[in-house]
Image: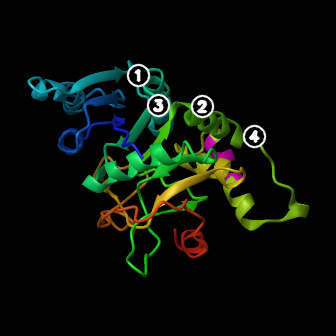
């Protein structure tokens, strides 16, 4: 397979140092097009506005390099879910293959190789709608490679323009379905109700709606056998996580696709994610 070098979208909000760290990692791994979308501060205090401006100035620190930077900004605060969707709409107007990293997600060097593999693989598997960089299920044989999953983990992920159109449509529609008590399925109801709550604005998330869409469709997420992205979002800017959240700051491992066989669903990993995560 010919390696595909994608662009990277960094979705930022106030974490200046993290955004700069992600940029440096991307450059070290050969990324040449970096898109940065910055949500406007909720509070217009001095520190928040300074952080906002500092993120917009990060590209200037690399002006002597061959890296292309493009910025997307807003005049008001959108919030977590709306910003992610809006930022992806923006970048996929300009690019076909994109890696997406929020500013609390620090990728390992192997994450980019893994994403490049996904962009090759998705051409052969139409139902492979995105690639997740995180993996929380144990890998007992310590092997590397990939599996399929119905649980899309978006702490570092990648997809294509064509698949993003399906994802956005599915996410926006997934909260409209209603469950039938007479056809009781605990997990089905869990995801449907979570998507409904997100659509109604009770929670500022979009990943629940994403999993609901994928879980009820014929699509899959690609998952690495080893974790490739570490979420460090347990600071004062965290919206949904805290320092006692089990899955934060998880160590990363290696990625190497050892054979040409297509990935399949790993039932043990799926059961672990369902019960533990």
For marks 4 and 2 on the same chain, the one whose residue lies earlier in the sequence: 2
Gap between marks 4 and 2, in whole Å? 18 Å
| Picture disc at residue 165 | 2
SS at mark 4?
loop
| Picture disc at residue 197 | none
Callout 1: few (<14), some (14-19), or many (20+) C-alpha neighbours within 10 Å? few
Callout 3: few (<14), some (14-19), or many (20+) C-alpha neighbours within 10 Å? many
Q: In the depicted view, which residue is nearer to us: 135 or 244?
A: 135
Q: Position of residue 28 (x, y in %)?
A: 17, 44
Magenta part of the chain: 192-198
SS at mark 2?
helix
SS at mark 3?
helix
Q: Tell us which disc is closer to us: 3 or 1.
A: 3
Q: Position of residue 185 (x, y in %)?
A: 79, 65
CB under 8 Å between callouts 1 and 2?
no
Q: Is residue 87 magenta?
A: no
Residue 108 seen in the figure: no
Task: Name the residue at the top extreme.
Answer: 75
Gap between marks 4 and 1, in whole Å? 27 Å
| Picture disc at residue 76 | 1
Q: In the depicted view, which residue is nearer to us: 73 or 77?
A: 73
Left or right: 40, with 199 as reference point = left
Q: Tell us which disc is closer to us: 4 or 2.
A: 2
Q: Residue at x 25, y 53 (%)?
A: 109
């Amino acid at each position: 397979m010919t390696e595909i070098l994608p662009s990277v979208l960094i979705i930022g909000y106030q974490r200046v140092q993290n955004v700069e760290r992600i940029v440096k990692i991307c450059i070290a791994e050969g990324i040449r097009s970096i898109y940065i979308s910055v949500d406007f501060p909720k509070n217009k205090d001095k520190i928040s506005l300074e952080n906002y401006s500092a993120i917009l100035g990060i590209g200037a620190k690399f002006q002597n390099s061959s890296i292309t930077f493009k910025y997307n900004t807003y005049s008001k605060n959108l919030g977590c879910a709306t910003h992610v969707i809006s930022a992806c709409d923006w970048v996929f107007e300009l690019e076909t293959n994109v890696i997406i990293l929020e500013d609390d997600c620090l990728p390992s060097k192997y994450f980019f190789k893994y994403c490049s593999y996904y962009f090759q693989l998705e051409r052969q598997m139409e139902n492979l709608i995105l690639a997740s960089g995180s993996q929380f299920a144990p890998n007992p044989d310590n092997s590397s490679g990939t599996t399929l999953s119905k649980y899309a983990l978006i702490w570092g992920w990648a997809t294509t323009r064509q698949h993003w159109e399906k994802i956005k449509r599915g996410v926006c529609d997934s909260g409209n379905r209603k469950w039938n008590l007479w056809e009781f399925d605990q997990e089905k109801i869990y995801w449907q109700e979570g998507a409904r709550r997100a659509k109604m604005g009770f929670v500022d998330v979009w990943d629940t709606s994403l999993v609901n869409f994928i879980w009820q469709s014929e699509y899959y997420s690609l998952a690495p056998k080893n974790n490739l992205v570490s979420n460090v979002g347990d600071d004062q800017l965290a919206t949904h996580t805290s320092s006692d959240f089990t899955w934060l700051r998880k160590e990363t491992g290696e990625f190497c696709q050892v054979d040409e066989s297509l990935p399949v669903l790993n039932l043990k990993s799926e059961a672990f994610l369902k019960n533990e995560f």
